Image (cartoon, rainbow, N blue to C red):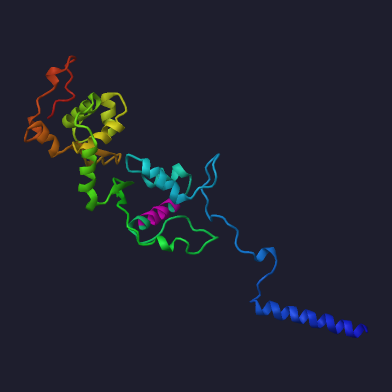
Amino acid sequence: MTNDLDETDAATTEADEVDESADGGRATGPAAEGPELSIVTPLDVPGQPHLDLDRALEAILFIADEPQSVVHLAAAVQRPVAEVRAAIARLRADYDGTGVSGEPRTDVADANDAARGIRRGFELREVGGGWRFYVRTEYDALVSDFVIAQTSTRLSQAALETLSVIAYKQPISRSQIASIRAVNVDSVVRTLLGRGLITEVDTDAETGALLYGTTELLLTNLGINSIDELPHISPLLDDGQEGFERD
């Protein structure tokens, strides 16, 4: 009887080994249920759930008025510069319709394949040592017409003052304008850009800040042929400053 039981146990063990071999050596039980749902490299933000790096950079760049350097972005999301560069490359490919964005995941393989090939109306462009969203060139005229049609014809006093500073001191950066006016000028500059009265003409060689200048539209509205025809403003200043007098 004992010999029969031993032979039965041996046969059962041999059958189990055959089953494991047929399964390619896969383990059974809870460990074989599949990979855990998690992001390989999560973004840690104090007080918030883990965030996707690509989406975090996208959110920051969406509200940025100035080009953001890779170092600045890396500091904002507290991630290595190399990871931020890779994320920007993924975002650009996504917007260009040649790839997808989002950090690599362990729970899905090609879930975003269906999103490939969608070329967006905007692009992520490197300007002045930083990255910023821009409308694609082929949509410039359409967007300009839309913005102009949606805005009123009158400029506020703040906008007129800012436009005067730019006209007399161009090319000039946003921080320099704010220093002269002693107020924040971000929204006013956006308004003037939207009206087509000023444009980005260059970048500061030292700081990388965008420099602004006036457009042909302003000359047309003022009825002059050149910015040099603007009157000298220094004699009109009470304190006799010559900050606005052109060379």
Q: In this view, does 103 lie to the left or right of 96?
A: right
Visible residue check, residue 89: yes
Q: Quadrant of the N terminus?
A: bottom right
**Residue 154 placed where, x, y %?**
20, 28
Q: Is residue 108 left or right of residue 186?
A: right
Write the residue at 64% across / 64% down. Answer: 33
Q: Quadrant of the C terminus?
A: top left
Magenta segment main secondary structure: helix
- Is 48 drawn above or below residue 118 in the view shown? above
Camera-side residue of 65 and 85: 65
- Is 149 drawn above or below residue 141 in the view shown? above
**Residue 175 placed where, x, y %?**
29, 32
Is residue 145 part of the magenta span, yes or no? no
Q: Is residue 116 left or right of residue 213?
A: right
Camera-side residue of 156 and 56: 156
**Residue 31 placed where, x, y %?**
67, 64
- Magenta range: 83-92
